[in-house]
Amino acid sequence: SIGPTVAALLGDHRSGRSTPTETLRRTLDLVEARGSDGTWITVVDRPTALARAAALEADAEARLLPLYGVPFGVKDSIDVAGWPTTLACPAYAYTATTTAPVVQRLLDAGAVLVGKTNLDQFATGLNGTRTPYPVPRSVYGGDLISGGSSSGSAVAVAVGEVPFAVATDTAGSGRVPPALNGVLGFKPSRGLLSTVGLVPACRSLDCISLIGTAVEDLRTVFGVMVGLDERDPWTRPRVRWTSSVEDLVVGLPDPAELSFFGDAPMAAAHHAARARVQELFGTSTPSLQPFLQAGELLYSGPWVAERLVEFGDFLAEHPDDVLPVVGQIISGGGRFSAADVFRAQYRLAELRAVVARVFTRTDVLVLPTVGTTFTVPEVLADPVTTNTVLGHYTHFANLLDLCAVAVPAGLTADGRPASLMVLGPALSDDQVLAVAARIALTD
Amino acid sequence: SIGPTVAALLGDHRSGRSTPTETLRRTLDLVEARGSDGTWITVVDRPTALARAAALEADAEARLLPLYGVPFGVKDSIDVAGWPTTLACPAYAYTATTTAPVVQRLLDAGAVLVGKTNLDQFATGLNGTRTPYPVPRSVYGGDLISGGSSSGSAVAVAVGEVPFAVATDTAGSGRVPPALNGVLGFKPSRGLLSTVGLVPACRSLDCISLIGTAVEDLRTVFGVMVGLDERDPWTRPRVRWTSSVEDLVVGLPDPAELSFFGDAPMAAAHHAARARVQELFGTSTPSLQPFLQAGELLYSGPWVAERLVEFGDFLAEHPDDVLPVVGQIISGGGRFSAADVFRAQYRLAELRAVVARVFTRTDVLVLPTVGTTFTVPEVLADPVTTNTVLGHYTHFANLLDLCAVAVPAGLTADGRPASLMVLGPALSDDQVLAVAARIALTD
């Protein structure tokens, strides 16, 4: 039930086949019809959205805007002036007084904000169950988790309420939920999309990310949002790439290095998708070990203390207002010393150097986005182990300064979504999107 | 009493005006004559050095080597196979089984190792008094400190024993001692000289550095040592620069931002040297504040915990074998948490971004290397405050990923050495050396 793409909506709005008002009415009808399904934390009120659509229609020049009348959602860890920012923690919520510059660029481009989407509390989780609001489910049913932390952003796109949503990605939050809902998740290189106005999870790793249903849409929306921002210390310029996708070398690790955690149908779906990649590209066989070792560093290392920098004071003052599993994870950051951080960063520097050499012989890497899926009861029964499994292939990307796109890649024999993840070195965003587009075409 | 330059020795050796054997004899005579002055911790034995010189002379092709028969010293925190590495801590000392690759490149280029030079213990200090061996003094007399931690390396060059020495620089160790001894100190950009075989002080910041008496010598020796090393995670390629030094914009901060700690003669000497720089270059007036704020971060922040990573176990097992002031500083790293490191790194990221913008309008910055000098009794009476003052202008360079050269810049009215420091962004080593050469010519 994926809805019209950004490109389709723009074509309709510009040609007059439909109007922003009609699109917004349809969107809000759909949101209302689904009710309290855990997708949205705050939804725009109908008169405001329709007034915005009408204003766009009344402005003769607005029709030329790159996102004229396109509805979108924003993860509720990102500020929009006048809206509450909750981080899925009502006691933490505050009303934002400024709008994150990446969101402002979308609004300035004619996009219409539909609402703020649900997330794992404090963006701490990859499973989507860690919320005091209703727990969203995957659109594939069977009580499958939506994935997290950008749970609502992925579901809103997957059910066709909005053609794209703004999410975030620290350890996989922008890739796992799209993988579990059959849509695209693009985590650009760190520093291309300003993180100003985002409440940090791990500030040294956080990225703004995009969820959508067509690679061309991701390119359009990314093109609107990208830009240097002096207020973001990690800001850096985009690098444009104009060569031919056919010439790229795609790294596919030895299958023996891939883990599917006993999920044979997922392994089969992955290998079928991988076979199509092998027909499309010249390939190499880099070892997955330095990537997984970096992921292990994130999972077991001191970066969790970054969450303590942001939420430590709140947690100390409001211990009962935080979900127990989230509180335990964040307070776990207190067990690491300064020396632990430096030690882990030395190891990371070594792994980064190894990975840099991998990417001299390989342009992009293609992996499963997730090795298996879980149901909501499975995650609630064992919230930490399941979460770690979900991050097996996503944990390392930001530590290693990579960019990535999760691409739908068919279904398992039992009807669950498979997803390929295309990963490249920093600033290879154009290449990674080009490979994703070629893979998506053949899906 | 500065000795012949590398260039002069090479000219003499190649033309036959003198031989490596004669040069080594003269060097060892000088070392012997000065006796236990705290310059050297271990000196090569005469037969070994003379055999090495004779072997070079017997090899017809050796004459073409870029450092044919040139004697040099190595700071005693860097491994040379078969030699003790002491770090100025006899209980810590071990006999190295491999040679640091940067030293090996010098040996392969025909240079002859004279010995391992004294240092502040564990390279922890900028003053030169923190050693259980005799405390070296500045060649300017008056009981002035040599500066540290590369104390012996600077003195060996300043008294003419060797034309260059290999040192290190974490917070100024490769610039303060040259400044206090009237010679040049070059701290290249991080990652150009392999740190393999160096016992780390702060591994994320440590650089191999060079001390010499002519910029052209620094270029020659650096050219021999530079090169990628896959074993060094921070390795990166040199960037060559071939434009004209006359076109560079030199940043000179507002004099009100400079501190001389009440040392009016030093302030006068600096301003006289600065006036010559203003005649040589187009100038800008960047604020010194982001640089000093980064220095303050190093001085008061969690990076000291890096020393604990390296020396913590030794310190715990041998508390009585470490100088009290060094032991106190290193164990002070234990007071910082993981969250403290991330918090400081966020602040550093902000300052790095500000400094990157400074260097879009300014090519290099010229500052005092040190704001004042101290005598040995002054440092012993107040070892921490004096050390902090010595690092006022040097603390920030490695945190901000800069390169730097300390250049002799005349004397104070009371006969103490002044030094200008040329600083540039990462990989601007050629520019920084070119500016240093132009300043040195007019000194």
Image (tube, coloured by chain):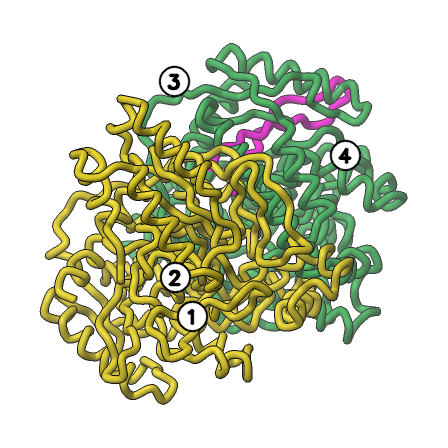
Chain colours: A yellow, B green
For numbered disc 2, what is the local secondary structure? helix
The residues bearing labels 3 and 1 have C-alpha atoms spaced at a distance of: 63 Å
Dots 1 and 2: beta carbons under 8 Å? yes
Q: Is residue A85 above or below residue B413?
A: below
Q: Which residues are magenta?
A: B401-425
Locate residue B227 relative to residue B376 in the image: left or right.
left
Q: Is residue A147 visible?
A: yes
Specify the subunit that label 3 lies on.
Answer: B
Type of residue at label 1? Arg
Q: Nearer the viewer, residue A60 or A259?
A: A60
Instruction: Name the residue carrying label 3.
Output: B247
The residue indicated by pointer 4 is B141
Q: CA distance from mark 3 to mark 2?
A: 57 Å
- Residue A137's disc is 1
Q: CA distance from mark 1 to mark 2?
A: 8 Å
Above or below, B72 against A19 in this view is below
**Who's the residue at 20% across and 58% down the image?**
A435
Q: Residue furthest right?
A: B381
